[in-house]
Image (cartoon, rainbow, N blue to C red):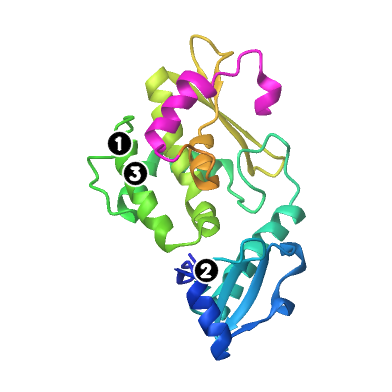
Amino acid sequence: MMKKPKTKQVKSKQIEEWIKEGRAVLRNDLRPEYMGDWSDYYLLDSYGLILRTTFERRNGILYERYSEYLDFMNNGKEKENLVNQIAISPNASFPGYIQVSVKEFESMILASDKVLASDFSISADVLDYSLESLIYLDKSINKMLKKFDAGDFQEKYCVLISAYCGEVMRRKINGNWKITSSADGILDQVLIVEKANPEYSYRPEIPLALILSGDAPGRSNLKIEVDAQLHKYGFIKGNEAHYGIK
């Protein structure tokens, strides 16, 4: 996974001093067109990069290496291009650039506790598919996200973590997995369906997706979001179209 570029907040006074000293040079010619004109680009000592909003022109963000910033942005663009190139159904649970077969996913379900415990250095007996175990997994996810690009993290771990969350849901409600694929056997949609009430379905990928996108409340965690799916947001009876479920 790609590590996040090293950054720090820089006060407006410091930026102005660098500009006067000739160390910070305005280089909006380096600004990508798709970024619009919301920020000014300054090169600092020819190798650092300062992003400063054009509206307030106060504080800024300093990337210690402009090259790291470029690699980080290009990595995101590559994923976006892959999403546009790979056709997926509107009901798909994961982005198009994440290609996992149904057989691979079924294997993940069975081994998700062991693999996650190993990759995130969590005690094996902690990941027992209980709601409480999600608290420990969430803490480990946050540590990883502080170091690595969220897009790379999603590509490597979102299917595996969703498999674990889905198994937590399945055991909690005594449900079944419902897994669909494309014609070539690639995973399309995953659901947890209640045995007693099959009209009740839940999408196990949503909790992590909400956290990675920043749409989850500030003090939320994986346990809270999984619990919310089961008891509030995940209930889709009579509202299948909204969740893309057929």
Which residue is label 2 attached to? 61
Quadrant assignment, res 185: top right
| Residue 45 visible in rendering | no
Magenta segment boundaries in residue numbering:
218-246
Between the residue at mark 3 and the residue at mark 2, the CA separation in whole angstroms equals 30 Å
Amino acid beneath label 3: Leu
Can you say whether 85 is above or below 112 in the image?
Answer: below
In front of the other: label 2 or label 1? 2
Task: Estimate the x, y position of residue 128 in percent, counting from the top left.
Answer: 28, 35
Dots 3, 1 in contact, CB < 8 A: yes
Q: Earlier in the sequence, mark 2 or mark 1?
A: 2
Label of residue 120 in the image: none
Label of residue 133 in the image: 1
Q: Residue at x 61, y 38 (%)?
A: 93
Crowdedness near tag 3: few (<14), some (14–19) or many (≥20) residues, C-alpha within 10 Å:
many
Assess whether residue 36 is covered by the magenta stretch. no
In front of the other: label 3 or label 2? 2
Disc 1 is placed on an element classified as: helix
Between the residue at mark 2 and the residue at mark 1, the CA separation in whole angstroms equals 36 Å
Can you say whether 75 is above or below 192 in the image?
Answer: below
Q: Residue at x 30, y 36 (%)?
A: 133
Amino acid beneath label 1: Ser
Label of residue 137 in the image: 3
